[in-house]
Amino acid sequence: MRYQIVLTGVGGQGTIFLVKLLAQCALNRGLDFIGTETHGMAQKGGTVISYLKIGDFKAPLVGRGRAELLLGLYPTETLRFLYYLKPEGVVVTNVESEEFPQLPFKTYTAPASELAVKGEINPKSLNVFMLGYAMAVVKDFPFTKEEVKEAIYQLNPRFAPANVEALNKGYSYALNG
């Protein structure tokens, strides 16, 4: 398996946690992986971009036009990093309004921030909600829901119940709206 994911958002949204979570899934399955992140201004709400490459790769950064998946936790950051996707790549992003632009990629959007404001999802688990959503809509997603749940418990047992609930809600939202 060779699969490249770019995850982006702003500081405090949990982008880095998602990379660690997916890396744990790869580790549990015995897959080669390499990942990295940049988060210089993350504490101040600045851009965070993370990369995860699953398979036999030598360098951690995803090249232009190489990613299978761009998972965005903040819409403007999603748009900023579209150039990482290969032509048949998939965008999954949190949106803050119905007016997300048409993209030349297969695109799935969920109003996770709006759902958090309404109290329908835990704002601290918006990242895991979006991961669950992505897992339901991306046909070739590299891990199963059970594998992700196991990794959630391994990384942070204290917050695992809330994160598993968010994962399930994201998955269900994708399937049922």
Image (cartoon, grey):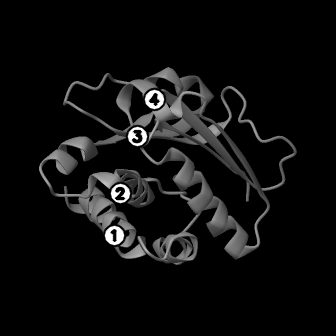
Report x, y in % for residue 173.
25, 58
Under mark 4, the amino acid is Lys
* Residue 72 on image: x %, y %: 44, 38
Callout 3 environment at 10 Å: few (<14), some (14 to 19), or many (20+)? many
Q: Which numbered disc, 4 or 3, marks the residue that appears first in the sequence? A: 4
Q: Which element is circle 1 on?
A: helix
Label 3 amino acid? Leu
Q: Is residue 124 above or below residue 13?
A: below
Q: Of the residues under marks 4 and 1, which one precedes in the sequence?
A: 4
Residue bearing mark 4: 44
**Residue contact between numbered discs 1 and 2, judged by CB atoms under 8 Å:** yes
Look at mark 3 in the image and give the residue it sits on: 73
- Mark seen at residue 92: none
In the picture, measured across the screen, residue 21 lies left or right of residue 118, that is: right
User: Disc 1 marks which residue?
Assistant: 162
3D distance between C-alphas at marks 4 and 3: 16 Å
Instruction: Give the residue at mark 2.
Output: 125
Q: Which part of the image, by quadrant, shows the N terminus?
A: bottom right
The one of 84 and 20 positioned closer to us in this rendering: 20
Which residue occupies 83% across, 48% down? 57
The amino acid type, in three-letter code, at marker 2 is Ser
Task: Please state the horizontal and vertical placement of residue 16, each as a whole percent of the image.
Answer: 56, 48
Q: Whole-Å distance between the Cαs marked 1 and 2? A: 7 Å
Residue occupying the point 37% across, 65% down: 167
Judge from the rendering whether residue 13 lies leftward or rightward of residue 63; answer left or right: left
Q: Is residue 31 above or below residue 141?
A: below
Judged by depth in the image, the label closer to the viewer, 3 or 2, is 2
| 10 Å crowding of disc 2: few (<14), some (14-19), many (20+) | many
The location of residue 4, given as percent across then percent down, is 66, 45
Using the rendered image of the protein, determine whether residue 3 is visible from the camera's viewpoint: yes
Residue 104, visible in the rendered structure = no
Report the side of 64 relative to 6 (left or right): right
